[in-house]
Amino acid sequence: MRGIIRAGIVLPTVLVGAGAIVLSLWAIGATEPAAFPPGNAERGAYLARASGCISCHTDAVTAGPALAGGAPLDTPFGSFVPPNITPHLQDGIGSWTIQNFAQAVRQGVSPDGDPYYPVFTYEFYAGFTDQDIADLWEAFRTVPPVANEAAAHNVGFPFSFRSGLKLWRAIYLDAPSTDARLGTSNSWNRGRLLVEGAAHCAACHTGRNLAGGLDSERFGGNAQLPGGSKAPSIQIADLLANGWTVANLSYALKSGILPSGDAFGGSMAEVVKFGTAFLSEDDREAIASYLLDPEGTGIVPPPDIPVAATPMAAIMDHSTMAMTNEN
């Protein structure tokens, strides 16, 4: 009997240990090109804004230096700290090659061959071209290096077992659908490229399952964003029901002002402040057009409800109250 009990304990332990070894030896990541085209720092800076690099890797809470490391992201899976991505040799990415950078951004693989946690939205960047990578690389090389070593992630078991992410990648990692679709406008295709790719809207506006994979109800909203924030549904029916049009959604991505006269809060306020406010008017309209016409029909339905105007007296009362609170 003791032998059976021992076998029942030892055998699973051996199998788990063997599985861990196999996962640790499982090589991931494809070889990046030996050479990239010349990069353009201005285009790269624009793409970095569209991709949320500044808002994530800059600590807005402490007003830290740009790209020197972001504020911790508290999630149901643990607390993750966005790293320093300035060209500092020790604390940033100054010792990387462009191939290291490309593999990190497009594949989610570190220079050491380890998988990054999907809190880094590399799955949405998988469609970046060699030119995109070269532009981003050139832009980041112009940022002043900052000596600021990011704190370690605070992640409990089993998520702390980094090699286990290789299984997650095999199940959930898919390249975004950003290819141009025949029969649709250039603006719609540009919006699709931004929404499904660089801007990674689904990362916040789609819920996640117990394993951290995106739910099947794409853009259906997410009640468990880092820090307890929430992202509403941006499915077309809900956008129309809340009075969104191409014009006011495009304006909101620039100003942060909602159709009701209220303003974005939480993480969306940072997305606008550090990202979409810097995009061109054409790109903001392209994003709005895609979200309000996801099938590319060329027809955007009118909103289901009229947008109620906010009385000027209410605005003044709110402003007076805010000033009183500040004093």
Image (tube, rainbow, N blue to C red):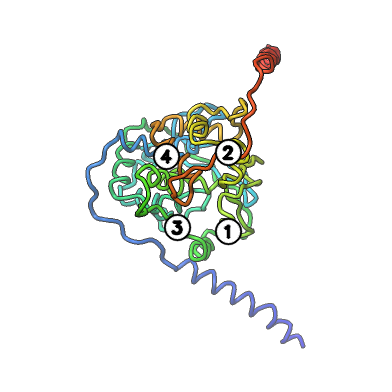
Give residue 256's position: percent from left, percent from top. Answer: 54, 29
- Spatial CA distance of label 4 from label 3 is 36 Å
**Amino acid type assigned to the residue bearing label 2 in the image:** Pro
Residue receiving disc 2: 303
**Label 4 vs 3, first from the N-terminus:** 3
Closer to us: mark 1 or mark 2? 2
Give left or right: position of 213 versus 10: left
Asked if labels 2 and 1 touch by Cβ distance under 8 angstroms, the answer is: no
Mark nearer the N terminus (3 vs 1): 3
Which residue is at a point 47% across and 31% down the rendered structure image? 274
- Give the class, few, some or many, for how many residues have Cα within 10 Å of label 4's Cα (few <14, many ≥20): many
For mark 4, what is the residue?
286
Total numbered labels: 4
Please, is residue 208 above or below residue 136 in the view? below
Residue 301 visible in the shown view = yes
Mark 4 or 3, closer to the camera: 4
Q: Real-space Cα distance between discs 3 and 1?
A: 27 Å
**Label 2: which secondary element:** loop
Task: Say whether residue 103 is visible.
Answer: no
Gap between marks 1 and 2 measured at Cα: 25 Å
The residue singled out by tag 3 in the image is 114
Asked which secondary structure carries label 3, the reply is loop
Residue 224, horizontal then vertical, whole percent: 65, 46
In the rendered view of the protein, which quadrant contains the C terminus?
top right
Q: Which of marks 4 and 1 precedes in the sequence? A: 1
Q: Residue at x 35, y 48 (%)?
A: 101
Report the amino acid beneath label 1. Answer: Ser
The residue that disc 1 covers is: 216
How far, Cα to Cα, is label 1 from label 4? Answer: 24 Å
Mark 1: give few (<14), some (14-19) or many (20+) Cα within 10 Å: few
Do labels 3 and 1 touch, CB within 8 Å?
Answer: no
Q: Residues within 10 Å of mark 3 (few under 14, many from 20)?
A: some
